[in-house]
Amino acid sequence: MRKKAVGLLGAAKGRAKPVAFAEDTCVPPENLADFIAEFRTLLDGKALNYGMFGHVDAGVLHVRPALDLCDPKQEALMHQVSDEVVKLVAKYGGLMWGEHGKGFRSEYGPEFFGDELFNELRRVKAAFDPLNKMNPGKICTPLDSQAELVKVSDTKRGFYDRQIDVKVRDSFKQAMECNGNGLCFNYDTSSPMCPSMKVTADRRLSPKGRAGLVREWLRQLTEQGIDILDLESNTYQQGATVQTLLNRVRNSINKSKEYDFSHEVYEAMNGCLACKACASQCPIKVDVPSFRARFLNLYYSRYQRPVKDYLVANIEVMLPLMATAPKVVNAALNQDWIQKLTASTVGYVDAPLMSVPSLNRVYHIFRCLICKSWLFFLKRRKSVMYLLCKILSRATTMLKSSKTLRNLRTNLDCNLYCCHLSQTARLNILRAS
Ligand code: SF4
């Protein structure tokens, strides 16, 4: 229930999504009922929808009010609610973080721990992480350091997401709605979730990483004043012209000279197997292949496609030609230097060999055999017809006499039945006659 709840809430429809900023509050269990009642009054008073679940025996409550963090007013409301929840938790003698980490709520640390205990924490931090490198500002800062704790009001994802045009946000929902729950960081070999992340152990190659990169790519394009949806529809309408080809080739040659963030997105997308495990296993249904296809379409409208894409796209045209001379093709594919060349230029390895004889040839041989059998039958049709008649008459007699077969006969036409008898059965009938 606890695990599923996060996914179910994350998949809520609409712009406002449950946000984990009042999550994990913990009060003595005997105060829990009153605490819940007051918590609900607080959220209802702000007309917020929310999901509430928890561990009653331990007094831990998980509350996720639904907010659209792309709306600055709702973001401000989040700070306000957060401060009020802190007061409420303190009133009931509890803690803001009863089970998991503090996240962006570290500013409340000194208030809950008290100066003395918090300074001890800072001393421990100074001993193990004097330069404040590990999770800076998240739990506490090293003693004598001027670094600040992170605050609920610090820049969050909503700040970047709101820079993307609303139409684009709605259109790229599969990337925008990723709530970062991290269930795709999954190394369980029995789970189908993201094989590319499992193999590489690179979080950029997880659905969460890919969704994040695409969001940043959309933001940067919006920042440059590019209407992505317009650009996309142009790519569908425009045919391939010599001019577009030349532009693509020129951009591809200049790739190494000009920085373009889309290359980083491309690197991440390129390793995706498009297996769609994310679309079914992720509780939010982050569907990487869908936005990957749209990204690649735009990317290849600016840069030249790799040669192997053209080979794969035209394989159905090339195969019949290759099948006309399979031995020649196989001899070429078996050459060491050709294998190395295709691997280094096209990126193909272990290209399958053509079947010899080809299926076409096998089909012709089979057809000839049928024709020969037919001619044989025509030449001897008199004797064969006689034999067939004998078989049919005997089969009919048997069908009449056998109860089981009679039942069968009601369902099957006699001749049809005879035709379907196995070779052994036919021989048996012949012997009996
Ligand atoms: S489709 Fe791509 S991102 Fe999604 S699980 Fe498969 S490999 Fe990972």
Image (cartoon, rainbow, N blue to C red):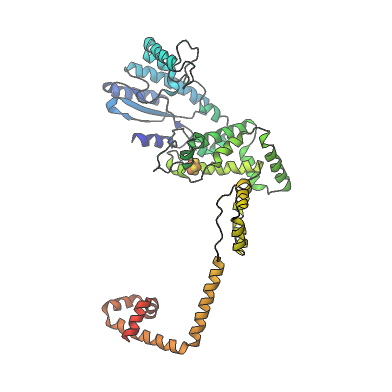
Q: Is residue 213 left or right of residue 189?
A: right
Query: Does residue 267 lie above or below 115 as drawn?
Result: below
Closer to the camera in the image, 280 or 79: 280
- Residue 193 shows in the view: yes
Query: Does residue 211 lie above or below 102 as drawn?
Result: below
Query: Does residue 19 lie above or below 312 as drawn?
Result: above
| Image spot of residue 302 (x, y percent) | 66, 41
Q: Is residue 374 left or right of residue 225?
A: left
The quarter of the rendered structure image containing the C terminus is bottom left
| Residue 84 position by quadrant | top left
Q: Is residue 241 left or right of residue 70?
A: right
Residue drawn at point x = 63 percent, y = 47 percent: 345
Residue drawn at point x = 55 percent, y = 40 percent: 269
The quarter of the rendered structure image containing the N terminus is top left
Closer to the camera in the image, 69 or 386: 386
| Image spot of residue 248 (x, y percent) | 69, 42
